[in-house]
Structure formats: C-alpha cells, structure tokens
Amino acid sequence: MPGAFNALTARLIEQVGFPAVYVSGAGLTNATCGVPDIGLIGLDEFAKLAGYIAAAVNVPVVCDADTGFGGPANAARTVQLYERAGLAGMHIEDQEFPKRCGHLAGKDVIACDEMVAKIKAAVAVKNDKDFLIIARTDARAVEGFDAAVERAKRYVAAGADAIFPEAMESADEFAAFAKAMQGSGVSGQGSAGQSELRTLNPQPYLMANMTEFGKGELIPLAELAAMSYRMVIYPQTALRVMMKSAEACLHDLKQCGTQSPWLDRMQTRKELYDLLKYDPTAETWP
C-alpha cells in the first residue's frame, strides 16, 4: 500500500495497479498544513481529508489514526467517523500524546492497559465487520523487542485485527516478530450488540512499514510476504519523490526562466484528464 497524501495521488496508486491505498498521518500533516507529524491535525480534519481520498478510488483505503485522538471514547469516535468517510480500516498506536514519528528518538508509550482499553472501545463500535482495526506498537524503540511482542499479543487478545510493529531494525527482527506472533489469535466477543464469538486469524495479520531513511533496512515485498506480513506500507515514497523532483524543477525555472526542459518529465494535460476520468468534450462527469 503506497501512501497517498491527497486524492489525486490515490488515483495514481490505483491506476498503476496497487490493490489498496494507505493514508499516512505524516503525509497529510506535511502536505496539507506544512507542519511536522506531531499530532497537529485533529480527528475531524483527518476524517475529512481521508474521506476525499477514499471517495476518489475503488480500492480499499487504510488510514493512520495516530493515538486514536485521545482516550478510549475518542478511539471509538474515530472508528465511527472513519467508517462514515468510507475508509476500510485504521491503525492506532500506543505512543504518548503528542506523538512523534515512529523512527525518531525521544518517543514514549502509554501503559499497555490503556492501549488495550482503546482497542476494545474501537472494536466495540464497528458497524462494518470488515473494517480493520490495526494496532501499532512503538515499544520496540522504548521498551525493547520482547516488550513489543508481549504488547502485540495483548492487543490481539483485545480484538485487534492486525498488528503493526513499528521501527523494527532489521529483516531478522521482522522475521522474529512474525514467528513470535504465531498462534496468538484468540476468540473474543463480536462488535457491540452482537453475542456471537468471532475467531481471529491463528496468526494475526501483520503490517510492515517500509519507510525510507528510518531505523530499518528496506526489505523487498517478496521477503516480507515469506515472513507472513500481509500488508506493507510505503507511506512517504511518492511524496518524497514528488518533492525532490519539484524542487529541482523550481530551481531550474528560477535560474532559466522557462520550464521547457522539463516538459518530457511532466504529466501531460491529457494524462491528468485520463487520471481524473475527465472528458472535456462531454456534458457530464465522470
């Protein structure tokens, strides 16, 4: 799942053929407000911006939800607003607020019991049984690898559909984490108002973060799949490439006074219209 920071990028991800889109909190925060990823965008803004993205594509969209925007009640409201926005799932993390980028030093995590309460509250209000609740743990960099594993097992027991171990430092750690999670699936109560039991995957779904310039190495998709990771995100890849290319183009424009040398590196008007499914000769759209 490449990261989209706006609806147009999401359309491009879908057009290229990816099966799903990821919405990075850092991407939304950086690209929309021009500020760092330290919890400066609130829940209503997140849901509105991510809703534009979800409405623009036909593939599932999974969105960052930071720390759940508060306590258990806030995490529950996040699920409700994200479902209404058309999202397919979200991940919440066990960092203290204000959160930090998961690959930076100086972050801290809340008590495990607090995170468990958030997960239970989030699961309880789901209307869509297929809406994914992904629990991210940042404990590897704070409390160590073993603590991250133990937290993840408790998050699965609380009802999380998937686990996102943030800031693993090597392929060996990713593999060890996946192995440690085998058999951690449990049975638990369904959503609020439902009495039936649901059986979680014997090995819960795992998400890997292949962000650039972070703590870990960039591991090929096939290797992660062989380790049993079923979701892999590339949260800032497109944004970083676009920004670097745009910076170079703007420097040239400032120096030369023309963009002509860049025309063969630009998306054409027709390519943009095709991406938007827009026919300027038609009376209606789409």
Image (cartoon, grey):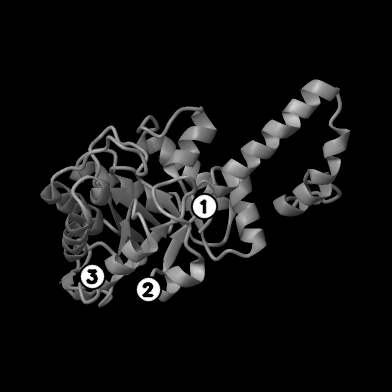
| Cα gap from disc 2 to disc 1, whole angstroms | 27 Å
Look at the picture and state if 227 lies above or below 192.
Answer: below
Residue 269: horizontal and vertical position, in percent?
Answer: 82, 44
For residue 113, above or below residue 100: below
Q: Residue at x 51, y 65 (%)?
A: 220
Q: Position of residue 276 (x, y in %)?
A: 71, 50
Q: Amino acid at mark 2?
A: Ser
Which numbered disc covers residue 258? none
What numbered label is drawn on residue 180?
A: 3
For marks 3 and 1 on the same chain, the one whose residue lies earlier in the sequence = 1
Tell me the tag on residue 54.
Answer: 1
Quickly name the residue at label 2. Answer: 228
In the image, is 90 to the left or to the right of 179? right
Picture quarter containing residue 254?
top right
Say whether residue 286 is visible.
no
Looking at marks 2 and 1 on the same chain, the residue that comes earlier in the sequence is marked by 1
Q: Nearer the viewer, residue 50 or 93?
A: 93
**Within 10 Å of the Cα at label 3, are there few (<14), some (14-19), or many (20+) other Cα atoms?**
some
As drawn, is 213 to the left or to the right of 190? right
